[in-house]
Amino acid sequence: MEYRIHPKTGDKIGVVGIGAGPVGAALTPAQCIQYALDKPGVLTVLPGLRSVEGVKQALSYFTASPEARDYAAIASLTPKDAAGACVYCNHCQPCPAGLNVGLINKYYDLAAIGDTLAAEHYAKLSKTAADCTGCGHCGRRCPFHVAQPQRMKEIAAYFGK
């Protein structure tokens, strides 16, 4: 994820690029789109389209099943320094305590870089990081080896709940 400054408004804009390199070649268009949408601050994805077939592949995202959008394969391609970072893939689900672990992490990451709207959204969650029981279910399922019980404590402390 790279952040750029909008030339007119001065706002930070999150930019994720997935090209024809090793990651792009290993994932389907639906997986690439889902991966980009799951990054903090990303609201729009604009696939690079070179043909009618490319348009059809990109549009297939809208009818793809959750399994077809699953980008867990990227875990084997991730640099070692990315291990331990939540990418909001929700492989940790279902949470026995009913937490939306990916969304909690996303709101935290956005709030930590100054997104006040993310903090407002977090406050409206019916279950927050403070509701984590520390059972470890999520950590055992995470392809990125995130220590979620510890992270939930950090997030609860940050938001005060």
Image: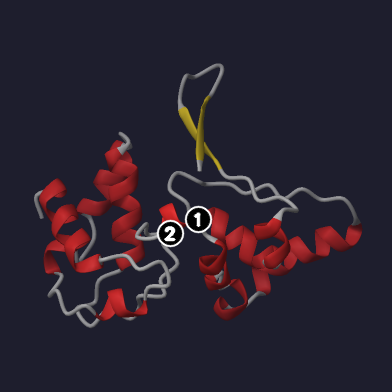
Position above or below: 106 against 76: above
> Which residue is found at the position 31% from the left and 57% from the top?
105
Could you tell whether 3 is left or right of 159 in the image?
right
Circle 2 or circle 1, nearest the eye = 1
Q: Name which of mark 2 and mark 1 comes first in the sequence.
A: 1
Crowding at dot 1, Cα within 10 Å, few <14 / some 14-19 / many 20+, comes out as few
The one nearer the camera, 19 or 67, is 19
Looking at numbered disc 1 in the image, what kind of residue is underneath it?
Pro
Looking at numbered disc 2 in the image, what kind of residue is underneath it?
Val
Q: Quadrant of the C terminus?
A: bottom left
> Which residue is found at the position 37% from the left and 73% from the top?
142
The one nearer the camera, 64 or 147, is 147
The one nearer the camera, 86 or 53, is 86
Q: Which mark is residue 87?
A: 2
Q: Residue at the top extreme?
A: 8
Q: Which mark is residue 79?
A: 1
As helix, strand or loop, the secondary structure at mark 2 comes to: loop
What distance separates the C-alpha of mark 2 from that of mark 1?
Answer: 13 Å
The spot of residue 53 in percent (x, y) is 88, 63
Q: Which mark is residue 47?
A: none
Position above or below: 90 against 119: below
The spot of residue 33 in percent (x, y) is 62, 59
